[in-house]
């Protein structure tokens, strides 16, 4: 019940295309859903985050869509660029659990020029 | 933005020795810090949660006597891998949370420390 399932495991997109990564969770007590970007040999960097009371949040080329009833959320990267090639992790946390982040398994994105 | 640093960025040690990794919040006070371990091409696995001035809370399966965590100040947490063995070789990453900030859920991650045990 603490798991966050992420798909796909890997994704190849042409430059300018839309990259879509999906996550699903079971625990309805989760109340914070961030997305992190990680380059090889580096720590994760926060991209964008959303709370369950909002269905969509957009920051630049990055958009989170959140479906509370389906217990799913997704990251959309518009106009994908080669510099976006990285591993993306979704995560979830809840206040009652000391804000511990439960990470998805990650998606390796490759954007071809 | 909030910056978290780690030192060293990489370390190589002999089997049986102990290694200390430092995690610092540079421009904010971290009331809570988290330690993660990441194996190649895998996700981040939470090892422990530490609150300033109190004992760390370890996740199930993590040996607290092997991975010693100290959070002595609001800007510094340390992870000591005692009697390291080759299977402890991994990428160790810390994160920090500022409970007094407006967005209390946000965790800021350090750049990670690559540990190789020979």
Image (tube, coloured by chain):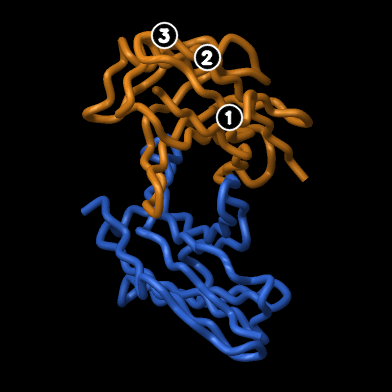
User: What's the CA distance linking mark 2 and mark 3?
Assistant: 10 Å
User: What's the CA distance linking mark 3 and mark 1?
Assistant: 15 Å
Q: Is residue B81 left or right of residue B63?
A: right
Residue on which the image places disc 2:
B20
Answer few, some or many: residues within 10 Å of disc 3's Cα (few below 14, many 20 plus, some between 14 and 19): few
Residue A68 lies in quadrant: bottom left
Q: Secondary structure at mark 3?
A: loop
Q: Nearer the viewer, residue A27 or A8?
A: A8
Q: Is residue A15 left or right of residue B58?
A: right
Q: Which chain is orange?
A: B
- Circles 2 and 1 in contact, beta carbons < 8 Å: no
Place of residue B96 in the rendered image (x, y in percent of width and height, measured from the top left): 59, 33
Residue A78 lies in quadrant: bottom right
Q: Indicate which disc residue B111 carries.
A: none
Query: Image point 74% across, 30% down: which residue?
Result: B28
Answer few, some or many: residues within 10 Å of disc 2's Cα (few below 14, many 20 plus, some between 14 and 19): some
Q: Chain of mark 3?
A: B
Query: Image point 73% across, 38% down: which residue?
Result: B3
Q: Indicate which disc residue B17 carries.
A: 3
Residue on which the image places disc 1:
B10
Query: Image point 68% across, 31% down: which residue?
Result: B5
């Amino acid at each position: 019940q603490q798991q966050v399932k992420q798909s796909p495991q890997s994704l190849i997109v042409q430059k300018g295309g839309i990259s879509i990564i999906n996550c699903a969770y079971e625990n309805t007590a989760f109340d914070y859903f961030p997305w992190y970007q990680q380059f090889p040999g580096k720590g994760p960097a926060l991209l964008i985050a959303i709370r369950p009371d909002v269905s969509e949040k957009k920051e630049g080329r990055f958009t989170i869509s959140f479906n509370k009833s389906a217990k799913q959320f997704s990251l959309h990267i518009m106009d994908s660029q080669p510099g976006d090639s990285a591993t993306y992790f979704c995560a979830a946390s809840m206040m009652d659990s000391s804000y511990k982040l439960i990470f998805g398994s990650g998606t390796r994105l490759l954007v071809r020029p | 933005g909030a910056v978290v640093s780690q030192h060293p960025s990489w370390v190589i040690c002999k089997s049986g020795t102990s290694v200390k990794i430092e995690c610092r919040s540079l421009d904010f006070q971290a009331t809570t810090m988290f330690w993660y371990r990441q194996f190649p091409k895998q996700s981040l696995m939470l090892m422990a949660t530490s609150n300033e001035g109190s004992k760390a809370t370890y996740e199930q399966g993590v040996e607290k006597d092997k991975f010693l965590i100290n959070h002595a100040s609001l800007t510094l947490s340390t992870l000591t891998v005692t009697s390291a063995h080759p299977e402890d070789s991994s990428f160790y990453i810390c994160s920090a949370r500022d409970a007094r900030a407006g967005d209390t859920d946000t965790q800021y991650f350090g750049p990670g420390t690559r540990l190789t045990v020979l």
